[in-house]
Image (cartoon, rainbow, N blue to C red):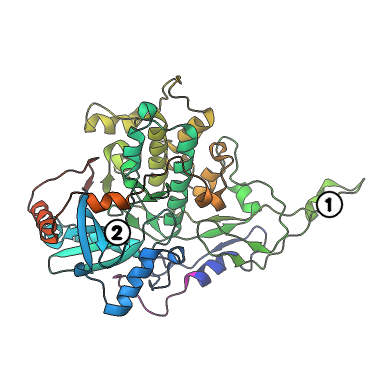
Amino acid sequence: MGAAGLDSEDESFDSCTSRFISNVEPGEEVTTTKRADPVVSHVLLRKPSSNSKPHKSNDMGWEAIQALRARDGAVGLSHFKLLRRLGCGDIGSVYLCELRGTDCYFAMKVMDKGALATRKKLSRAQVEKEILASLDHPFLPTLYAHFDTSQFSCLVMEYCSGGDLHSLRQKQPGKAFPDMAAKFYAAEILLALEYLHMMGVVYRDLKPENVLVREDGHIMLSDFDLSLRCIVNPSLIMSPMLSALPSRNGRRATSEIWVEPSAVALQSCVPMVVSQYRFRKPTLRRKGSSRADSAVTSPPSLPELVVEPTEVRSMSFVGTHEYLAPEIISGDGHGSSVDWWTFGIFLYELLYAKTPFKGADNEMTLTNVVSHPLIFPPNSESVNVPECAKDLIRGLLVKDPMKRIGSLRGAGEIKSHPFFEGVNWALIRCACPPEIPKPYRTEIATAAGVPTLGQALAEEKKKGMGWTHDGDNAVPEFECF
């Protein structure tokens, strides 16, 4: 993976997760032991291996890459045919490519190492590669392969034929999604952010341009060059402790649920582990017995796994102007709750076809984010946003990060909001997406684009020397330290 300090004695993911739940008593908080390394969580320090991505077990592209490695020993640039450029970002360009001798297509991010060194962004490229290598989630990208030439660094990832969510929104009536479609995309993004936070990654760059639409209509979050790696200290909190945690607007993140099995399943791709905590069956209170007596036999609520990296602090000034959280602009330092702020802006844009604090220029936008109140346009025939959606956005766009929904208990608190009522979180991958892209393989055969590999790399070299070429939906980003 490229990170320093990797060795075979690192604690396995399964054993680490098991300690969240095993041997728990009511009211007890179980936490993992922090490692001495202050940069990454020990979940992120896992060594990747050829069989470490269960979600790719039936993926034709994944199997083709593994077969290629077994045959040739390593994957290189000569194994791919570049077809056309898909777009470009701050540290590289992305090309549609074909694995030679197969019917497998990928997206290859090509970065000029000399240009990255000149702009002092080699560390950003390295962080992105290490994060991608650690991911295995239905709504996050898979790093199929990575390799370097003398001049370029290349990342091979999944090709998403449906474009990005910004382009898809532009095609909607009124350029806004209906509330049910917005709920679908927001739910999948929420699961992706939940997983990232569990892995000790603060994303920091959520926007529709970075949400890609797969061939099956589901989404994939992309671009991790602005992400922050950090220590994550997961906790399993039982019901007595949940009651002590602060609530917002009188709502709690959990509800009283009778549970008989001794297995507690963790959501968002965390393996199921068995708890030694036994929930007792509910008993009926006999006539004349006291309420205190019945309380003894009542089972607790389902435990809540809190995996929010609440202790991380960064002073970096990074992001996209319209999506920046107030704490980033003020320079007071920020943590993982910036992702919940951008999630609120993201949901607002899906529903209203614009961001809430956009000004006449970037400076005015930043001023609006810090000082202007959140205002919702009145409902109309074309845009009719339900009150539960507005309520969630209000909770996410609280300017004080400590009072923002999700800042203390993470995605679980947001999942329980009425806006997401009816979402089957466990089976969301089986749900029918609002739109499914047209088949793309026949179009690729006749698509005009980059005629040769040499021209593609020459184009990347020009960019590294100061040339510019904007993608179809370029949105300015910046990074200052």
Q: Residues within 10 Å of mark 1 (few under 14, many from 20)?
A: few
| Residue type pointed to by label 1 | Asp
Q: Is residue 146 left or right of residue 218?
A: left
Q: Element under label 2?
A: strand
Q: Position of residue 406 (x, y in %)?
A: 48, 45
Q: Position of residue 391 (x, y in %)?
A: 51, 32
Label 1: element kind: helix
Q: How many marks?
A: 2
Closest to the observer, 307 or 104: 104
Q: In this orientation, which residue lies closer to the viewer: 386 or 375?
A: 386
Residue extent of the magenta highlight: 1-13
Locate residue 154, reporting x and y percent.
Answer: 22, 63
Check if mark 1's residue and mark 2's residue have beta carbons within 8 Å.
no
Q: Earlier in the sequence, mark 1 or mark 2?
A: 2
- Disc number for residue 367: none
Q: Which residue is mark 2?
A: 106
Give the residue at the far right of this rendering: 288
Q: Nearer the viewer, residue 446 or 121?
A: 446
User: Which residue does the image show at 68% across and 65% down from the upper left?
Assistant: 277
Is residue 205 something one can see in this rendering?
Answer: no
Please indicate, yes or no, whether residue 96 appears anywhere in the rendered image. Answer: yes
Q: Is residue 8 magenta?
A: yes
Q: Nearer the viewer, residue 231 or 174?
A: 174
Identify the residue shown where x is 50% and y is 45%: 432
Residue on which the image places disc 1 = 293
**Residue 133 versus residue 330 in the image, above or below:** below
Q: Is residue 269 left or right of residue 92?
A: right
The residue under the point 48% across, 69% down is 13
Q: Main secondary structure of the magenta part?
A: loop
Pointer 2 local density, CA inside 10 Å: few below 14, some 14–19, many at least 20: many
- For image coordinates 31% across by 38% down, the residue present is 167
